[in-house]
């Protein structure tokens, strides 16, 4: 159901109008990102994103095409993302009803069926099954929202993140004259003062389709309030669950095939002599925390009093503030400081951790592979004990004490009836990292690029380097407030690059790479020494440096090794002895940190459920460490450790773009590595035969991955990464940081693979 049924009704009654896109020449159009992305995927989807992970490359290609069309017509787009979920939209228990968990469970079942088809050799049927999952959920496209924000920021395209729903924020921007038109879902019409809504833009035909609200309401025979009530009954953004009676009547009349049938039933209820008696008297057979009538009332209030970020810098209800009820938190959620909403609005922090703090609940959804293996679940528990508590502690420290003491529960997809508690790290954590004060001036060559290699290199004393100079540099990074100095005289980071670097270094200290006096820990020395060994080809490649750092952090956390998944998952190495297969498994896992670049038309090639399972671990690692960095960023800003007034309005979004651990690699390079070695291991070549076998394997690889831009180049990059990870592991063993068992896996694999890498 959902408000799409209203659009179907409008189509039936010929209320939609299509006109030339040039009509909007010179206008600023506010775009609901979620609605926009859904339409893009309807036109051209990438079903195998569900099988390889990462971000769909065709999406950026389509957006660039639309942006180009807008520019040619002097149309200015302003993209608006959803922010925190309103409390009433998440009222269902996790994994029940219309909760995100329930939707995730449904998607996981479809993916499992697709993998069954693939493993039976029915590839075409598997692709169809993957396509049924859909790819429009940006939050589940592995950092999808952050990737788009980074793209918009880097290309100076206007965007905003609403404190809650994008619909209300768009309405506010329209009411205040910041935008001239709204392109979004029917939900936008549930707010007053919006007369016309663009429901679709097609830049290929240079046209758009719009809906007049007055004609819609006239044809329905309802006023605005009745229209809102009808939309709630069919399910809307703030209250996804439809009125059960609508579903029952659909089933009784056989109306499931008619897209407009739900709204017709809802209208008949609303226009009946006693609609509220019908709604309040209905007994919902499903077990829910509240009655449907209470849900209905709260949904209506959530629309009427939806908070928006205003030009005053405050986040307030879209309606008159004096009318706001005192229990708004019951249907919107716990309020955060205006400063935090400001950082959300500019994309400095994702809403996941803030939602955990305000709701008191962390819901772990099944990853793309299904998450059945013990390795993923064990790594998840490590994050719950180590990373999440620290991120939540840093955020709560700069909020009201209520959040510092509020308990956090977690529910996981594989044990939905059991809640466990996440204990936040002590509040003293902030004070342990607050001494970082990095300015560009302390770097001898400046900070041309705020990548990990440039940031970390001066902290390491290379062979032949003057240790006194390194110690002097480290000493200069520690903030020591002069006695008697006024607060205004204390230096603070004041530009996007400096603010980002200070946040990153705080996070790396918490991750175990620095001591409290800013010296590298043993693991920090291993990682920085390995980074310094990066070949010149990748010296300015921030993504390669991040891949190397993440791989070694995963070794540190005990999740990157040659141990087979348990229970076994199909799609692992197939050729050679068990020892050789272990070598290939480890090499494929390291290769997974490098994303395969494929053409925008979408990925095509072999798949591996086994490699995707490891990619899920990589994705969760990136998500967690990015969250840790963002928590440090907000902690730094909210505690006044940066000169916030010195940051220009247009520079706020650039801070987020300067942070590492954004893009999640797909699993395709890992699959390519497995395919390459399986081809080599299909025979037992002698030393003289190896060059010919490698040539044949390369040729077959380019045939298998036809849509890849250059699969051999990506695999070569993965081999370069392997060499460095291998060197880092050897160094870690020398320092006594890892077990000899894990080290021997890497060393024996390194000896075996030497003749085959290129």
Image (cartoon, rainbow, N blue to C red):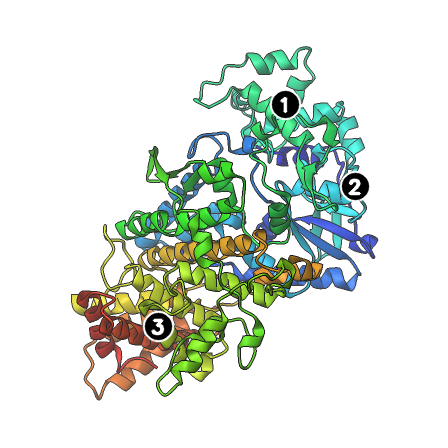
Horizontal and vertical percent position of residue 178: 78, 49
Q: Secondary structure at mark 3?
A: helix
Q: Is residue 146 above or below residue 95?
A: below
Closer to the eye: label 2 or 1: 2
Residue at 56 percent across and 20 percent down: it is: 294
- How many numbered discs? 3
Q: Secondary structure at mark 1?
A: helix
Q: Earlier in the sequence, mark 2 or mark 3?
A: 2
Horizontal and vertical percent position of residue 270: 67, 19
Which residue position holds label 3? 525
CA separation, marks 3 and 1?
Answer: 65 Å
Quarter occupied by the N terminus:
top right
Badges 2 and 3: C-beta atoms under 8 Å apart? Answer: no
Horizontal and vertical percent position of residue 233: 60, 25
Q: Is residue 685 above or below residue 725?
A: below
Closer to the eye: label 3 or 1: 3
Residue at 68 percent across and 58 percent down: it is: 645
Res 178 seen here:
yes
Q: Secondary structure at mark 2?
A: helix
The crowd level at tag 1 (other Cα within 10 Å; few <14, some 14-19, many 20+) is many
Q: Earlier in the sequence, mark 2 or mark 1?
A: 2
Quarter occupied by the C terminus:
bottom left
Horizontal and vertical percent position of residue 537: 46, 82
Lateral position of residue 488 relative to residue 118, left or right: right
Q: Earlier in the sequence, mark 3 or mark 1?
A: 1
Instruction: Judge by depth and name the residue closer to the eye, 311 or 480.
Output: 480
Which residue position holds label 1? 266
Q: On the image, which quarter does residue 577 sit in?
A: bottom left
CA separation, marks 2 and 1?
Answer: 29 Å
Lateral position of residue 459 relative to residue 526, left or right: right
Which residue position holds label 2? 175
Instruction: Judge by depth and name the residue closer to the eye, 480 or 432.
Output: 480
């Amino acid at each position: 159901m959902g408000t799409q049924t209203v659009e179907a009704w409008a189509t039936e009654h010929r209320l939609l109008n299509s006109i030339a896109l040039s009509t909007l020449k010179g206008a600023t159009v506010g775009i609901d990102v979620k609605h926009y992305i859904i339409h893009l995927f309807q036109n051209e989807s990438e079903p195998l994103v569900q099988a390889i992970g990462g971000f769909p490359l065709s999406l950026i290609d389509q957006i660039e095409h639309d942006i180009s069309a807008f520019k040619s017509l002097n149309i200015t787009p302003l993209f608006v993302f959803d922010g925190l979920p309103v409390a009433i939209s998440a009222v269902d228990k996790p994994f029940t009803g219309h909760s995100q968990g329930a939707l995730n469970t449904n998607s996981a079942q479809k993916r499992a069926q697709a993998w069954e088809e693939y493993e039976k050799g029915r590839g075409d049927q598997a692709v169809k099954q993957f396509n049924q999952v859909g790819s429009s959920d940006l939050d589940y496209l592995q950092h999808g929202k952050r990737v788009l924000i980074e793209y918009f920021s880097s290309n100076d395209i206007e965007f905003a993140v609403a404190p809650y729903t994008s619909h209300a924020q768009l309405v506010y921007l329209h009411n205040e004259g910041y935008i001239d038109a709204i392109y979004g879902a029917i939900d936008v019409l549930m707010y007053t003062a919006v007369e016309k809504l663009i429901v679709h833009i097609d830049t290929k035909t240079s046209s758009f389709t719009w809906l007049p609200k007055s004609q819609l309401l006239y044809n329905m025979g309802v006023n605005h309030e009745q229209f809102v009530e009808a939309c709630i009954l069919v399910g809307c953004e703030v209250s996804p669950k439809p009125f059960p009676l609508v579903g029952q009547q659909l089933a009784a009349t056989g109306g499931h095939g008619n897209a407009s049938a739900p709204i017709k039933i809802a209208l008949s209820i609303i226009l009946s002599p006693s609609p509220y008696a019908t709604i309040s008297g209905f007994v919902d057979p499903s077990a829910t925390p509240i009655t449907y009538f209470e849900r209905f009332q709260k949904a209506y209030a959530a629309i009427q009093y939806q908070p928006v970020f205003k030009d005053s810098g405050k986040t307030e209800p879209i309606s008159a503030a004096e009318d706001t009820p005192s229990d708004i938190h019951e249907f919107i959620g716990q309020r955060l400081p205006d400063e935090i909403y400001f950082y959300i609005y500019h994309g400095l922090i994702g809403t996941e951790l803030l939602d955990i703090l305000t709701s008191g609940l962390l819901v772990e959804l099944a990853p793309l592979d299904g998450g059945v293996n013990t390795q993923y679940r064990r790594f998840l528990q490590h994050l719950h004990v180590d990373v999440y508590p620290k991120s939540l502690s840093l955020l709560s420290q700069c909020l009201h004490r209520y959040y510092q003491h509020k308990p956090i529960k977690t529910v996981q997809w594989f044990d939905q009836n059991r809640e466990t508690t996440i204990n936040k790290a002590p509040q003293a954590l902030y004070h342990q990292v607050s001494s970082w004060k990095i300015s560009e001036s302390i770097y001898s060559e400046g900070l041309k690029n705020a990548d990990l290699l440039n940031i970390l290199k001066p902290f390491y004393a290379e062979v032949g380097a003057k240790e006194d100079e390194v110690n002097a540099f480290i000493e200069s990074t520690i903030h020591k407030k002069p006695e008697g100095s006024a607060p205004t005289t204390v230096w603070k980071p004041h530009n996007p690059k400096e603010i980002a670097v200070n946040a990153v270094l705080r996070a790396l200290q918490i991750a175990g790479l620095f001591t409290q006096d800013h010296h590298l820990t043993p693991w920090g020395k291993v990682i920085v020494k390995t980074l310094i060994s990066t070949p010149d080809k990748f010296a300015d490649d921030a993504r390669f440096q991040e891949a190397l750092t993440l791989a070694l952090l995963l070794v540190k956390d005990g999740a990157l090794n040659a141990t087979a998944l348990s229970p076994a998952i199909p799609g692992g190495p197939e050729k050679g002895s068990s020892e050789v297969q272990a070598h290939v498994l480890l090499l494929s896992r390291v290769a997974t940190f490098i994303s395969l670049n494929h053409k925008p038309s979408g990925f095509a090639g072999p798949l591996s459920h086994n490699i995707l399972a490891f990619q899920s671990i990589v994705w969760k690692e990136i998500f967690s460490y990015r969250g840790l960095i963002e928590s440090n960023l907000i902690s730094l800003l909210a505690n006044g450790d940066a000169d916030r007034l010195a940051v220009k309005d247009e520079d706020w979004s650039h801070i987020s773009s300067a942070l590492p651990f954004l893009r999640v690699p797909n699993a395709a390079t890992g699959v390519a590595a497995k395919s390459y070695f399986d081809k080599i291991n299909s025979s037992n070549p002698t030393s003289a035969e190896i060059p010919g076998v490698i040539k044949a394997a390369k040729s077959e690889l380019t045939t298998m991955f036809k849509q890849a831009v250059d699969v051999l180049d990506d695999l070569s990059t993965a081999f370069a990464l392997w060499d460095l990870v291998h060197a880092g592991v050897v160094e870690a063993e020398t320092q006594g940081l890892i077990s000899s068992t894990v080290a021997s896996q890497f060393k024996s694999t390194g000896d075996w693979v030497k003749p085959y890498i290129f």
